[in-house]
Image (cartoon, rainbow, N blue to C red):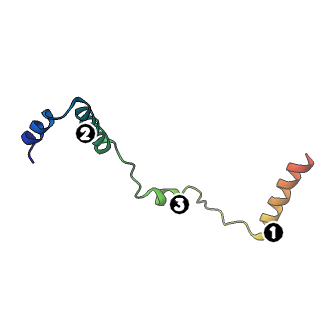
Amino acid sequence: MNVQELKNEAYKLSVSDCLILANSIIQSLQDDLRPRPNRQGIAQRMIGLLKTDEPPPNDAEVEAMLEERLVEKYLK
């Protein structure tokens, strides 16, 4: 069906059906024109957010950090 045939059929619709059709067309256009976020590469960019030049803490350092946190939380 070409555009002219579609227009001719639209004139045959009731007012409520015409409004439904117009709403559907507008919604379709909004969906097509709305910019979609670039999901590719987001994970790659996020990987570097927490990256540092420091080596990860060893078990003793983690234990000391946890103990320090508990002291701050419960004894101060």
Quarter of the rendering occupied by the C terminus? top right
Q: Quadrant of residue 56 in the image?
A: bottom right
Residue shown at 31% from the left, 39% from the top: 27
- Whether tag 1 and tag 3 are in contact, CB under 8 A, the answer is no
Q: Nearer the viewer, mark 1 or mark 2?
A: 2
Residue occupying the far right of the picture: 75
Residue assigned mark 2: 25
Measured as percent of width and height from the top left, residue 55 is found at 66, 66
Q: Nearer the viewer, mark 2 or mark 3?
A: 2
Residue shown at 85% from the left, 49% from the top: 73
Disc 3, SS: helix
Residue assigned mark 3: 47
Residue shown at 18% from the left, 35% from the top: 13
Position of residue 31 relative to residue 39, above or below, is above
Residue occupying the far bottom of the picture: 59
Q: Please tell me how crowded label 1 is: few (under 14), some (14-19), or many (20+) other residues with Cα within 10 Å.
A: few
Position of residue 76 relative to residue 66, above or below, is above
Measured as percent of width and height from the top left, residue 36 is found at 36, 48
Residue assigned mark 1: 60
Left or right? Give the position of 50 relative to 67: left
Left or right? Give the position of 54 relative to 65: left
Q: CA separation, marks 1 and 3?
A: 26 Å
Disc 1, SS: helix
Specify the amino acid type for callout 3.
Answer: Ile
Disc 2, SS: helix
Which mark is first along the chain, 3 or 2?
A: 2
Q: CA separation, marks 1 and 2?
A: 63 Å
- Whether tag 2 and tag 3 are in contact, CB under 8 A, the answer is no
Specify the amino acid type for callout 1.
Answer: Ala
